[in-house]
Structures are given as C-alpha cells and as structure tokens.
Amino acid sequence: MEPILELKNLEVNFNTLDGVVHAVNDVSYSVKEGKTLGIVGESGCGKSVSVLSIMRLIQEPPGKIKKGKIYYRGQDLLKLSEEEMEHIRGAEIGMVFQDPMTYLNPVLTIGKQISESLVVHKGMTYQEADEITKELLNVVGIPNPTDRMKDYPHQFSGGMRQRVMIAMALSCNPRLLIADEPTTALDVTIQAQIVELTKSLQENLGMAVIWITHDLGVVADLADDVVVMYAGYVVEEADVFTIYENPQHPYTNFLLKSLPRIDNTRRSERLATIPGFPPDGITVMPGCPLMPRCKFAVERCNHENPPLREIAPGHKIACWVEISTGKER
Amino acid sequence: MEATTTEHERIKYQEEFRTSPLKPGQLVWKRFLQHRMAVFGAIMLIVLILYSFGGALFFTEAEANFPDLSILLTGPSVEHPFGTDTVGRDIFKRTVYGGQISLLIGLSAVIVEVFVGVLIGAIAGYYGGWIDSLLMRFTEAMFNIPQLFLLLVMAKLFGGKIPPIEIFGRELSGSVIVIIVIIGLTSWMYLARIVRANFLSLKERDFVMAAQTIGTSNLSIIFKHILPNSIAPIIVSGTLSVANAIITEAYISFLGLGVQAPTATWGNMLDRAYNYVASAPWLWIFPGSLIVLTVLSINFVGDGLRDAADPHGLVKVE
C-alpha cells in the first residue's frame, strides 16, 4: 500500500552548550494510509523529536534538521514554506500531546480552542464552527457539549482534557493523527478509554495514526506496524505480530522482558531491567550505541555501528548478532 | 437502546444541577470587591466622572470661561463656591470642564501607551532574536532621554499645528490631541518591558505549541492565544498609567506648554496660580485637590486590580 508519510534518512541535531546532541540519526520509517504505526523506546530516544520534525515544530536554534526528507503524500514537507506548512498543520496532520494539563490554553474556552482550527482552515466564523464543535465533543464522549464548550480547561479532568485535545486535533478531519504519548499522563482506566476512542475514530474516519508510547501493551492493542527506537536510531521495524512473536533485536527483547506478565506464576520474581542508561547523544561512539548495555555484544559491536538491514520480508533490524545463536549474522 | 436514553437523561439531570465554577472574570471581580480601598477608589472615581461630565449639564463652557473682570480674584462665596481666578472666571465651573479634559487626556494617553507598548513588547518577546534586540535597544534609547525634555521638545514642535477638533459636542484645541499623543509616546516603555517579559515566558508554554500544531499563524498566536494570558499585568499597569498621564499633563500645563487657554484643564488652572500661592490659595487648592483625589483613587483601583488579578490570590469565604 502507498505510504501516506515517509521519513527518509532524517537527521536532527541540537546545539547545546555541552555540545551537539544527535537526537535523531538517519531515521527512516513510513506510515501506511489508514494504518497505525507505533513508535516505542525509552525516554530520550528521539521519538518525539522525529514527529515534531514532521510538523516542522523543532525550534531553530537550538535544533536543526540536518538532512533527510519527509514525504507527505509525495510532497517533501521540509521544502515547504512556513505559510504552506500552516495549511498542513491541523488540516492534514493533527497532533495530540502527552500532557493535556499544559497543552490547553487556560484563558480560552475549550469551544473556542476547538473551533479555532475550523476558523483557520475552513474559513468559518466562530458561530458556524460552534455546531461542528458540539458534534466533535459528542464524538469524543463529552456529555452536554452545548454547556461544556463554554467552560475553561481548569473545569475539566485530565481524561476529559485529553478528549478535548483529540477533538481539537480531529476538527478538520486530518488524514494523519500524531499522538505523542497521549496516555502517559492518564491513569489506566482512562488510558484504555482513550485507546478505544482512537481505535473507533480511526475506523470511522479512515485516518492514519502515529502513536508514540513507552507502553508496549498499548502498542499491541493499537498498532499495525511498530518501530523501535534507541539513541536516535531505528533498531527494529516490523509488523506488530512479528515484534511480539519473534523480536530479533536485543533491545526489543530487553523491552519485552521488562514487562510484567499476567501469566507469570512465580510472583516473587523481579522484573527484568536493562542495566545502564541510554547514551547522552553528545558523545558519538564508533560502535553500536547499545553495546555497553547489551549482553549479546560481540567484538564487532565495539567499533562498528550496525546499519538497519532487512532480515525477513518487512522485518528490519540493526544488529550484528543473531540472538538465538549468539553468533554474528 | 432504552438503557442509553435513561443514561443520557441521568447525565442531563446531573448536569442541570451542576454548579459551574466561577469564570476567571468573575473571580477577579469577587476579589476586587473584597479590597476596601479599591472599592473606595472606584466609587470616588465614579463621583469625579459624574462631577466633570454631569456638571456640564447645568452650565455651558462659555459660561465657565466667561471673564467677569468686576469680580476677579474673589474668594469662595455662595455664588462662586470655589472663588474666581485672575480674570474673574468661576473656578468651580472651570474645574468641571477642566476635569473632562484631564480625564480624557489620562485615558486616551494610556490607550496610545498600551497600544504602542503591547505591540512592541509582544513582538519583541515572541519573535526574540534580532527583532527583540532591535526593539529593546530602541526602548532603552527612549528610556535614556529624560521624559520631561522629550515632552517639552515635542510640545514645542507640534503645539499649535493641529486644528481644533470636536469631542462630546465641545470644541477642543488641537493641543489636547498633541498632549495625548506625546504623553502616550513617551510612556510606553515600562509597559513594553512588562509585556515582553511576560511573552518570553508564555511563548515557551505548551499551549503555544498546541496552537501551532493546528496551523495557527504567528500573529494569531500572539494576539489571540498569548495576549489574553498577559491581560492582567497590562490592565494593572495601564490603570496606574492613567494617574501618571494626568500628573504629566498637569506638569506640562503648569509649565505653560500644555493645553492652551481658554480650554481649561486641572493642570493649566494651576499655571497662573503660583503667583498667588499665599494671597489667593483657592486658585490652586481646588484644582490641585481634584488632581490628588483622582490620582489617589486610580492608584487604589490599580492596587486592587493587581491583587484581584493575581491568580494565586484567595477569595475570602464569609
């Protein structure tokens, strides 16, 4: 299927006083029309930076998109002018953020904030947009929208605010929704509701979704394809079944092992952890960035960073080692 | 299906009895009412406005400016409650018409000030970089010229070049407009700095990025998303500036470069008074007291607004 969005060899740096942070290195992934791509990885692995680059919302300076291409329906977003980009944001690509507490403007009513997109992109007046806003609030499951749209964000709970954010992102029927850890700040029951909501909306509207999360459980529930990122690199890429049934990259394995399992009968057993920290992104080591934390590491990992290679149709990993045998591939 | 209807009804029922929390504006109003001095100031201001604009209903400006040389420099009496001035004009009537001008100048100058200050501060704070540097160096340059000097030069330069205009059915000398513009253009710098500082912190807030993701343009983010968040300091500083503008007007008028006679202002009524400080104190006591009263009231209101607009302020529960 034709991908709606395609990142090619994206590289994003941040110039800080400590040195250049290589936040995103040579990252390529694509999202298929109407499908969901899950991006997982630890904090600081470049997940958010890569999607903010899609929206062209990396602050320059200190950030800089060094190279790469981002094709949205065949058009390179990095070549568009700021004004053309404003027509993409909101109208074509919607975005939902992690913390609904801070991403809503405290002094504007939520009705006004949802209508804004319609006013900007569809040229409606606020009165005309009101009807659609009510409908949107209904769709995202906020009762009594006629009254609630006159309320301010502080009058909503966290889960409700995330619904408002989703309504904001959906108001112009975008073809692609980027969700940057939308459930991380919510408790589990609300998280499940938001995931269900997104799934049903996606089915009804046929949009593609990029869902960033730490939570492998959510990814299993939601995603069609999965990209695992580490230290600004894509380390494994496959469809969701392969990732869970047959993970080939050591890092993906470590992540899956660190999940609590409901079928674990030995309750006393502690969860597996990954020792150490992800690299800071400033010091560039010649070898694989995972090497110091990886129990499968071999001699070659010390001095050569493995490229992303296809090991089976649709399944790519960046590792020198065959983990079942412990030998070099 | 029936279950959902009843659920819907239940929710509706619940929502009907929901007590909505106070809107931000209502909160500010409630806190303001608890500030005694501010309420006193507000009432005082209303009285002063009624005095200058209501008083005008009982006599004309021509009457107020009519020189009756037979009664010049008489003290307060029943007929002339505030006495008469050096050319025999009734001081009470002149303070009424002068009050209109003083209040008008105070308010309009602040409108000019807020407009310039907000524009410069917002653009500097939001865009940052060289735009910020340029605008802030300009602001500092304006700071470095003594305001009085600037005022006097501009008053001299533009005074008498503007034709008279009509407001509230009164013909005002062009010098009123000149004074408004000069005061506005020499006092916006503090406000610009306040707004800039506010914008510097507000533009980093997450909701600005959220607004960007729905394709809102920069100008719309500045004026529709960030500005409403910094409205409180602007209102407070604007209110206090009204008092300053009234004083500044009195100041220039006292020096004879302000609004030109026969148009009265509280300030230029003081102008002629200083030769008679001891011999005819009613010449300066009445307009002077009115200035003091107005400025004091405005400052009380400004103080009250500052406390009321503080989001961490509390509403006392009785």
Image (cartoon, rainbow, N blue to C red):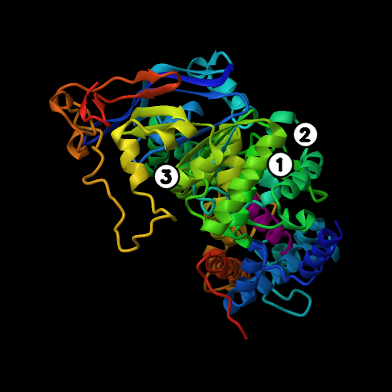
- Of callouts 3 and 1, the N-terminal one: 1
Q: Is residue B197 above or below residue A235?
A: below
A163 or A191: which is nearer to us? A191
Q: Residue at x 21, y 45 (%)?
A: A276
Q: Chain of mark 1?
A: A
- Identify the residue position indicated by label 1 in the image: A115
- Identify the residue position indicated by label 2 in the image: A124
Give, as a single range, the part of the protein colored magenta: B96-114
A177 or A37: which is nearer to us? A37
Q: Residue at x 81, y 69 (%)?
A: B13
Q: Quadrant of residue B52?
A: bottom right
- The crowding category of the residue bearing disc 1, from other C-alpha atoms within 10 Å (few below 14, some 14 to 19, many at least 20), is many
Q: Residue at x 67, y 67 (%)?
A: B22
Q: CA distance from mark 3 to mark 1?
A: 31 Å
Q: Position of residue A15 (x, y in %)?
A: 28, 30
Q: CA distance from mark 3 to mark 2?
A: 38 Å
Does the rendering let one see residue B237? yes
Q: Quadrant of residue A292?
A: top left
